[in-house]
Image (cartoon, rainbow, N blue to C red):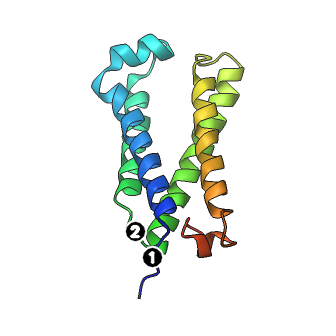
Amino acid sequence: MRTAASPAGVRLARAHGLFNVLGGAWPLLRMRSFEAVTGPKADRWLVRTVSGLMVANGAVQLRAEPSQDGVTAARRIGMGTALVVATVDVVYGGRHRISRMYLVDAVLETGWLVAWARCAASPGGDAASTGCGGGR
C-alpha cells in the first residue's frame, strides 16, 4: 500500500516541475528572446543541452505520483537541480563569466530549496510524515 503524500508536497512538486519545464523550454523555443535577457551565447548546443535536461527534470516532477515515494523522487530531482543551477549561477554570475541576470535565477532556485525545506518542516514533524518527500 502506498502512503499518500500531503497536498502541499504534491502542489510543490507540480509547481517546481512547471517552473523547470517552462524555464528549460524558453531557449529551445525562443533563443533570441532568451539571449536578449541573458546575453549572447557562444555555445548554443550547450544551452540546448541544459535546456533539454531542465525540461526532462521538470517533466519527471510534473508526473510524480501523488504518493510519498512520488513526492520523494520529485523532491530529490528538484533539490538537486536547484542546487546545481544556483551554484553555477552564483559562481559564474559573480565572476562576470555569465550575465549577472543569472544571479536573479540563483535567488529563484534558492527559493525552491527553501520551499522544499519548509514543506518538510511543516507540522507533523519530519518530511516522511508531512508527505513532502522525506524518507528513503
Using residue 135 as the reference point, say whether residue 95 is left or right of it. Answer: right
The residue carrying mark 1 is 4
Can residue 135 be spotted in the picture?
no
- Residue on which the image places disc 2: 66
Local packing at callout 2 (Cα closer than 10 Å; few below 14, some 14-19, many 20+) is: many
**Vertical position of residue 30 compared to residue 36: above or below:** below
Disc 1/disc 2 C-alpha distance (Å): 6 Å
**In the image, what residue occupies the spot 34% across and 19% down?**
31
What amino acid does circle 2 point to?
Pro
Q: Is residue 121 visible?
A: yes
At 47% from the left edge and 14% from the top edge, which residue is drawn?
37
> Toward the viewer: 56 or 132?
132
Q: From the viewer's perspective, is 41 left or right of 87?
A: left
SS assignment at label 2: loop
Where in the figure is residue 133, as x and y percent of width and height? 55, 67
- Looking at this view, name the residue that lies furthest to the front: 123
Does dot 1 land on a helix, a strand or a loop?
Answer: loop
> In which quadrant will I find the N terminus?
bottom left
Residue 19 percent across, percent down from the top left: 43, 40
Placement of 115 over or under 107, stated as above or below: below
| Image x and y of residue 123, in percent | 67, 67
Q: In percent of the image, x 61 and y 50: which residue is there?
A: 115
Q: Amino acid at mark 1?
A: Ala
Residue 34, horizontal then vertical, whole percent? 40, 19
Name which quarter of the figure residue 43 lies in.
Answer: top left
- For disc 1, the neighbor class at 10 Å (few under 14, some 14 to 19, many from 20) is some
